[in-house]
Amino acid sequence: MFGIRFRAIAAAALLGAVATVAGVSTTQHRAGADPILVNWASVLPGLTDGYDPGSSNVCVAGKVQCIDAVVREMQRRAEPLVDTCSHQALFALTYLRVTETYAWSARQPGYYDDPGWTNHAVAVFAKYYLNAFDAWTADSSSTAVPKAWRIAFDAARDGKVSAAGNFFLGLNAHINHDLGLAMEAAGLTGPDGRSEKPNFDQINELLNSVTLPLIAELSARLDQSMDDSSLPLSLDATATGEVLWGWREQAWRNAELLASSTPLTRDVIIAQIDANSVTQATTYATTMAYPPGSTGAADRNAFCAAHHDDPAPEAYPFGFPTD
């Protein structure tokens, strides 16, 4: 029942999803590693949302070392989720792998026209997920957790929805709720006044390159039903990815609306963003729930318990992951 939906959504999620995610040093990079090792906790207090290339804070200044610090934070959260077969692991591992690939891309000359802005925007965007995750972990009823995230986290904790449901709930919260807010906060133009939209869109090429190895890893380690469709993966990705591309584009438009808003209209726009993300989350939590009497959750847990330590079967653009 869930097979095609699992793989289609997983593939599409990579195609359209984590748009401006953060990254990590790769095996290839470590051969000539940067000498600076930055601790996320040391830069977070000074991580203001605005981009300033001259800042002493490596994240505000858009230095790639900030991205390395972000990914270490993602690893710190994702690894125990994978080890315990938490249903939150699907989104956490996905985000981690995309961030690792982003770090690789950020170190490729010419990949982005303005890598400093992209690095900064990536860090700001990641902060929304990390803050929501930490707030929910400390108190699942906290008002500091956006409603769309609370629905996603609660569904994962309770084992109520399919793998695709966990996947889509996380993506909905991070794109439909967080992305527009994060991009407006990071700034939509660079220091020279040019729009950063081309850099925002360039991430699409990156995400496309991650799709196949990610689905292979999720299927091999967490839930084999992620890759049980009879359709070619490219067709699944094309069909479902269109939805998520639309989400990303709408998030940028929301950021533009926020950037040009008045105090009065800003509150209205934010309320609309929140309401849309909650509506979507409620829909996915309902339509992608395991049916009564289903053994889907138990089968998933048993498979993960036996395979979560297995290596990734395919290389990513940065190589094979070591975590």
Image (cartoon, rainbow, N blue to C red):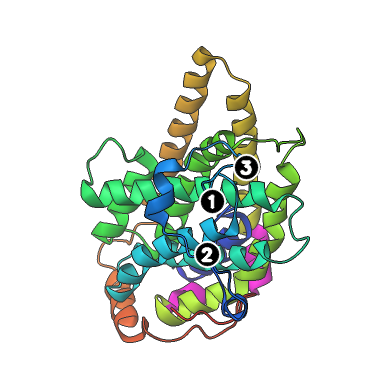
Residue with the mark numbered 1 = 58
- Residue in the picture at 60% in, 52% down: 119
Q: Quadrant of residue 162?
A: bottom left
- Residue in the picture at 29% in, 68% down: 294
Earlier residue among tags 2 and 3: 2
275 horizontally vs 98: left or right: left
Residue 304, how many percent across, how many down?
A: 34, 79
Q: Out of 289 and 276, give the one closest to the viewer.
A: 276
Q: Secondary structure at mark 3?
A: loop
Name the quarter where the C terminus is drawn.
Answer: bottom left
Label 2 with label 1: CB-CB less than 8 Å: yes
Label 1: how many residues lie within 10 Å, few (<14), some (14-19) or many (20+)?
many
- Vertical position of residue 198 compared to residue 98: above or below: above
Magenta highlight range: 224-239
Name the quarter where the N terminus is drawn.
Answer: bottom left
Label number found at residue 54: 3
CA–CA distance in space, label 2 to label 1? 10 Å
Is residue 203 magenta-colored?
Answer: no
CA–CA distance in space, label 1 to label 3? 9 Å
Residue 296, how many percent across, how many down?
A: 32, 71
Label number found at residue 234: none
Q: Out of 82 and 158, give the one closest to the viewer.
A: 82
Characterize the magenta stretch by its predominant secondary structure. Answer: helix
Residue with the mark numbered 2 = 36
How many numbered dots are placed on residues in this image? 3
- Residue in the picture at 63% in, 21% down: 260
Q: Quadrant of residue 189?
A: top right
